[in-house]
Image (cartoon, coloured by chain):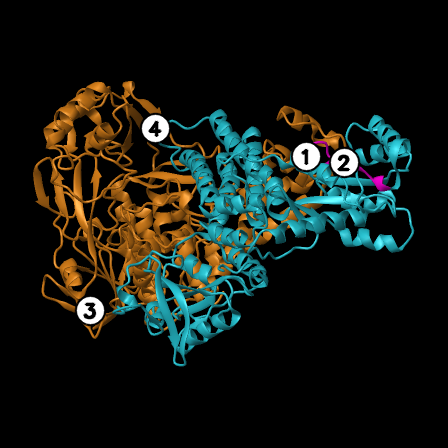
Chain colours: A orange, B cyan
Amino acid sequence: MEYDVIVVGAGHAGSEAAAAAAKMGSKVLLVTMDMTKIAQMSCNPAMGGIAKGQIVREIDALGGLSGIITDKSSIQFRMLNKSKGPAMWSPRAQCDRIKFSIFWREELEKIKNLDFWQDVVIKIIIEKGKAIGIKTKLGRKIKGKAIILTTGTFMNGLIHVGRNRMDGGRISEPHSTGLSEQMKAIGLRVGRMKTGTPARIDGRSINFKKLVRQSGDPERRRFTYDEVKFKRLIQRDCYIAHTNERVHEEIRKKIKESPIYNGTIQSIGPRYCPSIEDKIITFKDKDTHQLFLEPEGEYTIEYYLNGFSSSLPLEVQIAALRKIEGFEKAHIFRPGYAIEYDYFDPTQIKHTLETKEIENLYFAGQINGTTGYEEAAAQGIMSGINANLKTNNMEPFILARDEAYIGVLIDDLVLKGVDEPYRMFTSRAEFRMLLRQDNADYRLTGKGFKIGLVEEKKYNRMISKYERRDQWLEIIEKTSIKPEKVNNILEEKKSSRLRQGVKLREILLRPEIKIDDLAGRIDEIKQLVEKEDDYSKELKESIEIAIKYGGYINREKNMAEKLKRLESIKLRRDIDYLRIKSLSTEARQKLNKVRPKNIAQASRISGVSPADISVLLIYMGR
Amino acid sequence: MIQHRSLYICKVNPTIDFRDTICAVSTPPGLGAIAMVRLSGDRAIDIADSLIRFPGKGKPLKTLSPNVLRFAYLSDNMGLIDDVMVSVYHAPHSYTGEDVVEITCHGSAYIQQRIMLALIHAGARTAAPGEFTQRAFLHGKMDLAQAEAVGDLIAAENAAAHRLALTQMRGQVSEKIKTLRSELVDMASLIELELDFSEEDVEFADRNSLMDLAGEILHTLESLTGSFRQGNVMKNGIPVAIIGEPNVGKSTLLNALLQEDRAIVSEIPGTTRDFIEDTITISGFMFRFIDTAGLRASKDKVEKIGIDRTYRKIKEASLILLVTDINSNPESVQTRVNEIQSLLKDDEQHLVVVVNKTDKLTGSRKDETGRRWHETFDHVILISALREKNLEELRERLVKIPALKQPGDQEIIISNMRHYEALSHAAEAIRRTINGLNEGLSNDLVAQDLREAIHFIGEITGEITTDDILGNIFSKFCIGK
């Protein structure tokens, strides 16, 4: 029996990959070491955040499941950066860790073509440079037209707690071996990365009165664009705590016990997510660090202490913890730990996430050197889509940098490679203003529908939303407003009075004036505030952004168009870069390794300087 | 020198193959005591070796240590061509970054031609205009700004332009702009920090310090763009307009100035100079007479040159020479001067009254009239263009005008139009940045302007180059010489 697509690993990448390929019609097998750990949140119990929230909405707009599952398991919602421009608005949700996993499994089980197998994959079967199946620990050989590897931190995973080292993919879960050795033998470049996670705390041992409470937004927004009803979970609060000199002293005293500082761990961890010992050593002058205590679930007493990731010995972690105000009697359920794992240099994959070396073999998630559930899920859905398309002899599905954060993510990986675990930031996107959380449906749902991943109902909702937006914009453009009608509202909002009649649009251009402020008074747009459902709110937000930020949006659109022209200067695949002596040595090697398709791609490769691009342009006869 | 001027109009030929070994006569065409032929490319040494023989035992050229000058015989299959001096430069330590051989021969056109033919027979091809510098650019020997400066250097017509081009070629402008760019990047980092890490426990730059930072950047940008007028003056000459009523001797004056200049230049032995019409060089400064053809044409027609007609010319000029006949009425000239003065920008434009035809008067009448002119005007120069009398005073006066202030050696002057445009755009983007900060715009919106500024600065040193810019550069200026 042969599958179309075999997905190895059922984390965030694997689950999205399996779901996407199966929904598009592939016969899919999802292989996992433990079926009770599907889409496990290995680190903090939250989805979204700055740039990451936008990614979750993009995945949803494309027809993925991370959005709806986050909504269903959410125990706190916040829209971050709400005081900034709309490009920065970023949804974030605390989730019930266990329910998140359960909901994922339920969703996957609903998909017809999706089969499961619990086992460990030890080898990819390769014939004539093509991946054709897998070999498992239980001795099964299973054939598949495409294989997607999503190994997370499991490939040769090594866990550190102080001087205590143990093999494992997550604490108390075995690691996997064999795959990276096989790939290395074939000639793939394998590297090692490090990440960490903090201790889990017994909430009953915490004096919450000494901490600062942080509640969710009163308005609970959704990640999903789907019109589905579901039961909301009970909302929980987070708490803010602070370290102090006494905490730092405890850690400094025992710093030699940390595998990072005694040389045991050599691999690179993320600079933006340092362990507590890193923070204290690197930022000596800072006498306090902020910590977040995040609930692990709807009812549980377990908490996750964000900001206190550590690989110090258990007793040092506890001693330091108990010096934190409110944590004097802290009891933990498990310590923080560091984990090292294998990844493959992502310049070895194409924009479809298929490896260049082995046809029909795809990599998604941490195996490509990324970090984060959202980044993993994004690669997952894209690999699932492309595996389906390839096995059906269809054109590949690639998102551009001005179309989605997912596009920025994959383009960066493939062209620039990674030298630390890669996380998305809004500053990585040249066209931030275009890649907003509010318009992910506008950007991607049409594409998702075209490839058969988005259902018709969702697509129609998107079409009608933007048709209606444009109609409203026309009305707002045309409607004239007399001063007496709005002047007292303007005054109330500390906005200057009108002297003469103006178009409604002019008033809405003022940053301090919202549709909600005016709609009650102006019959033409009254309808906009009559309904309070998600759809109406989204529509109103979309109208408001189009008016208030139209200028900024158009500027970026023009910039994007201008840069697109570089995409049209194609580079032949057979160029021997090593022979172009005028290129810098680094550029020669990088270009030869990455083999960009066009000048725009070449210009984004790290180590390829603008002077090198000029050289290429001259060689191209430009 | 014609060949060099054509630098500006030649286009990159897509059929050029950079693997070829190229040769060209690198000294100006025509008769001179000596001439230099340059060869560059992988086979430069081999090719030259096949033609060159050293006196005595005759070691091959390959063994000649680089960067030294040696006497040698150069022959082709017909026999000895010339006694020459040869030097070899090994890649990448040469102008082009390739192997280079320079052969200095006697200046006869026949010798030059025969050497070139011999080299071509031996496997070289003639270089396309600008190809040497183009190769230097391709081998990373210089950045875009530097390569452009090479063109300027070759074409430098005077001391100031020469110094300017030299400064730019040495990369000082690029350096300054790189510093500016990194300042901008610093500022952008501060802004992005608050956007991507707003949830983190870090201290964000406050509006005031961001504004200070932006203010500093703007100041640097403005001083650079401000130097463009001066840079332009240094490169292209100080624009001078000669105005005045018909038959006051404007053309005679111009011809007198130009002729003397020609004479001065040709007196310097060995100098052959591409003479640009209507420019003169005084004390190292170049003056460019604008729209003088129009002025000359007006000589044929008797018509009043009204203020309106000359207005355009006046606006372009840094220096306006108002020429008048010694027999004119100083008071009515005063009225005309006042009219013109009202059109001028105080700091940037200067008017000099030149009273011509002193040769018409003699003796006491001459002295008395002269006195009357000096009483009416503080600074007036009495000359005879026809007899070339007192032109020295006029020349001295010309070089004293404030537009010619000598920049210090450390001062960076922008003279390149493309740089000027990019800096202006960057300054504009920074002004919008400051406005945005002032108006309390969210940082993500401010960041958009800042990114634009960085983009434009990058255009100068080629750090953020686009097809558009390169297309523009290569269409106006062929990288190379």
Mark 2: few/some/many CA within 10 Å (<14, 14-19, 20+): many
Labelled disc at residue B352? 2
The part of the image, by quadrant, that contains residue B4 is: bottom right
C-beta proximity under 8 Å, tags 4 and 3 = no
Labelled disc at residue A286? none
Which quadrant holds the N terminus of chain B? bottom right
The span from disc 4 to disc 3 (Cα, nearest Å) is 48 Å
Percent across and percent down for residue A17 are 30, 58
Are labels 3 and 1 on one chain? Answer: no
Are labels 2 and 4 on one chain? Answer: yes
Labelled disc at residue B201? 4
Identify the subunit bearing mark 3: A
Q: Nearer the viewer, residue A337 or B196?
A: B196
Element carrying mark 2: strand
Look at mark 3 in the image and give the residue it sits on: A133
Is A353 displayed left or right of A565 in the figure?
A: left
Percent across and percent down for residue B418 are 56, 49
Is B475 displayed left or right of B103 in the figure?
A: right
Q: Nearer the viewer, residue A374 or A219?
A: A374
The span from disc 1 to disc 4 (Cα, nearest Å) is 59 Å
- Say which amino acid is labelled 3: Gly
Q: Which residues are magenta?
A: B342-359
Identify the subunit bearing mark 4: B
- Say which amino acid is labelled 2: Val
Is B141 displayed left or right of B324 in the figure?
A: left
Element carrying mark 3: strand
C-beta proximity under 8 Å, tags 1 and 4 = no
Magenta region includes residue A473 = no
Percent across and percent down for residue B127 are 47, 68
